Image (cartoon, rainbow, N blue to C red):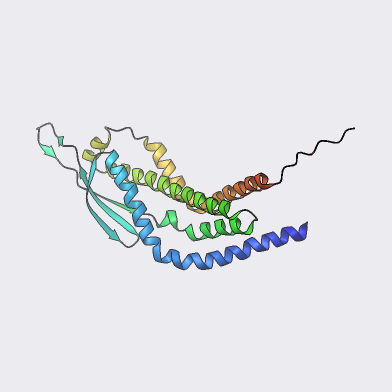
C-alpha cells in the first residue's frame, strides 16, 4: 500500500514537472494578450453598468490605462453641463501570475489517474473554465474598487457614481482579499476540485454487481 502511494505521488510529481516545463514558455508568450483581453472585458462591463464611456485605452507594460468620461449628461446648479475626465489604471499581473503552476498541477492530477479519456478532457475543460471565471470575478471586483478610489478624489465622479448602489467597504475588503490571496491559493483550490471530481469518476466507473446477498 505504501509503495503504491509512493508510486502515485511520484507519477503526479513527474507529470507536474513535464507539464510545467511545457506550459511556462507558452504562457510567457501569451500572458500579456490574455491579461489585456480579460482586463478589457471586465472594465468594459463595469463601465457599461455604471454609465461610463471609455474614450481611450493605452497599454503600459503589464498595465492598461483607461480614459473615461460620463455617458449620461451632468448639469450643475448653474445648469451648465459638466464632464468627467478620469484615468483608471488596472494591472492584472498579480491576479494571473500563478496560471502556469495551476495548469501544470491540473494536468498532472488529471492524467496521472486512471479514468476514461473523455472524462479527463471534460474535467480539464471544466477546470479551465472555472479558472477563467475566477479571474473574471477577481478583476471585476478590483475594477470596481479602483473606480471607487478614483471617485473619492473627484467630487463630480463621486456624485455620478453615487446614483448606483456600491457597497464600498465590502468591495474594498473583497478586492484586497482576492488580490492578496486568490492567485496564491488558486492552484490548491483547483487541485481540490480536480481530486474530488476524479474520485466521483472513479466511483461511477466501478463495476456494479447484482449478485444476491448470501443467506445467513
Measuring 65% from the left and 47% from the top, which residue is drawn there? 199
Residue, x 60% and y 56% (percent of image)?
109
Closer to us: 169 or 20: 20
Q: Residue furthest front?
A: 211
- Give the position of the N terminus as an image quadrant: bottom right
- Above or below residue 52? Residue 188 is below
Where is residue 53 drawn, in percent x and y?
A: 22, 45
Rendered residue at 65%/44% (across/down): 204
Q: Is residue 98 visible?
A: no
Residue 125 lies, with reference to residue 6, above or below; the image says above
Q: Residue at x 42, y 45 (%)?
A: 137
Count of marks, rendered view: 0
Q: What percent of the width, then of the height, locates residue 112?
A: 63, 59
Seen from this angle, which residue lies furthest right? 216
| Residue 146 in picture, x, y percent from top left | 33, 46
Left of 97 or right of it: where is 167?
Answer: left
For the question of whether residue 26 can be seen, the reply is yes
x and y, in percent, of residue 15 in the image: 60, 63
Looking at the rendered image, the quarter that the C terminus falls into is: top right
Pick the front one: 163 or 172? 163
Say left or right for 11 vs 158. right
Quadrant in the rendering for residue 94: bottom left
Q: In which quarter of the image is residue 28?
A: bottom left
Amino acid at each position: 500500500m505504501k509503495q503504491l502511494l509512493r508510486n502515485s505521488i511520484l507519477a503526479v510529481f513527474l507529470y507536474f514537472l513535464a507539464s510545467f516545463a511545457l506550459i511556462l514558455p507558452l504562457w510567457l508568450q501569451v500572458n500579456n494578450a490574455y491579461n489585456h483581453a480579460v482586463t478589457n472585458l471586465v472594465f468594459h462591463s463595469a463601465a457599461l453598468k455604471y454609465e461610463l464611456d471609455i474614450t481611450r485605452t493605452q497599454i503600459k507594460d503589464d498595465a492598461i490605462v483607461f480614459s473615461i468620461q460620463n455617458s449620461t449628461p451632468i448639469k450643475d446648479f448653474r445648469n451648465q453641463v459638466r464632464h468627467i475626465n478620469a484615468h483608471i489604471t488596472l494591472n492584472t499581473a498579480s491576479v494571473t501570475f500563478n496560471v502556469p503552476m495551476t495548469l501544470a498541477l491540473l494536468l498532472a492530477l488529471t492524467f496521472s489517474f486512471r479514468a476514461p479519456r473523455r472524462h479527463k478532457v471534460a474535467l480539464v475543460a471544466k477546470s479551465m473554465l472555472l479558472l477563467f471565471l475566477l479571474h473574471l470575478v477577481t478583476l471585476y471586483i478590483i475594477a470596481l474598487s479602483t473606480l471607487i478610489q478614483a471617485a473619492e478624489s473627484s467630487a463630480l465622479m463621486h456624485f455620478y457614481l453615487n446614483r448606483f448602489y456600491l457597497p464600498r467597504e465590502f468591495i474594498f475588503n473583497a478586492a484586497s482579499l482576492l488580490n492578496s490571496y486568490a492567485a496564491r491559493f488558486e492552484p490548491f483550490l483547483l487541485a481540490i476540485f480536480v481530486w474530488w471530481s476524479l474520485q466521483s469518476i472513479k466511483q461511477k466507473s466501478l463495476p456494479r454487481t447484482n449478485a444476491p446477498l448470501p443467506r445467513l
